[in-house]
Image: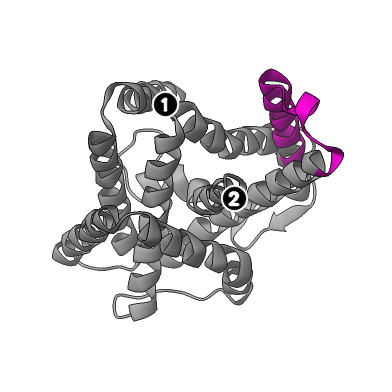
Amino acid sequence: MLKARVLTALALLCALLGVLFLLPPPAVAAAFGLVAAVAAWEWAGLMRIDTAGRVLYAVLVSAFCWQTYVLGAAAFLLFWAAAAGFWLLAAAFWLRRRWSMAANDLLGYALGVLLIVATWAAMVALHGRGPWVLIGVMAVAWVADIAAYFTGRACGRRKLAPSISPGKTWEGVAGALAGVFIYGLGIAVATGYLVTASLAGVVVAALCLALLTALGIAGDLFESLLKRQAGIKDSSNLLPGHGGVLDRIDSLMAILPLAALMLQWSSQ
């Protein structure tokens, strides 16, 4: 299992870097669209839809991505704002009340379109700012996940959400925050931000990192809840050792739309 996990991770990394640095922007958007289609297929599986329905839903989400691409910046902003609103205002209530989705649940279909298309749009827009910008934002989720895992393994005692994801602990949350702050400090030093920024700017940046980290954890818990309600361990078995696409982008779905909004606001 470990060997398969490592090999799959290396393959995914090579594929990601190839897409980000070798393809023109329209092809990058199309590649991200393929990821969105697979994520939609898995989302429909979490709703326990039959095979034909899953394929149809993947096509529907792909069509939304394409139309959003055609409409441009205004549509991107609309999806980001709506997705950020869900993660900031509704996700905690969803997790607390353990709401579930079923094959006839219109809310489940709509929510999947919103979250997947918003994530796709954020990836396209952040890549438009530069491949390293997208990698830098995605790394917030990666660093948080790694730091939480090792901190939780080393000293995790108090369970975060035992009925949803028994392995997650509050100590892991603290480790995730510490890891992301260290990562942010490294980026700030490397880019010279600490030299040019005001104290208020540094504080705001730290708060933004903390918020993104918290949302990433919420995204992870949200997908874990959906899988538990669907009675499955992974969203699919497409990625050996890693489960499915949703298993890999659950945190990113919560982080990327808000990060795109933050960067859009800061650049105006």
Q: In the figure, residue 5 lies in which quadrant?
A: top left
On the rendered structure, is 213 left or right of 27? right
Q: Is residue 245 magenta?
A: no
Q: Residues within 10 Å of mark 2 (few under 14, many from 20)?
A: few
Q: In the figure, residue 130 lies in which quadrant?
A: top left
For residue 131, say whether it is visible. Answer: yes
Of the pair 94 and 79, the residue shown nearer to us: 79
Of the pair 52 and 253, the residue shown nearer to us: 253
Label 2 sits on residue: 262
Dominant secondary structure of the magenta stretch? helix
Residue sitting at 49 percent across and 27 percent down? 132
Query: Residue 15 location in percent, x, y?
Result: 32, 25
Image quadrant for the N terminus? Answer: top left
Label 1 sits on residue: 9
For residue 156, say whether it is visible. Answer: no
Counting residues from the start of the chain, the first of labels 1 and 2 encountered is: 1
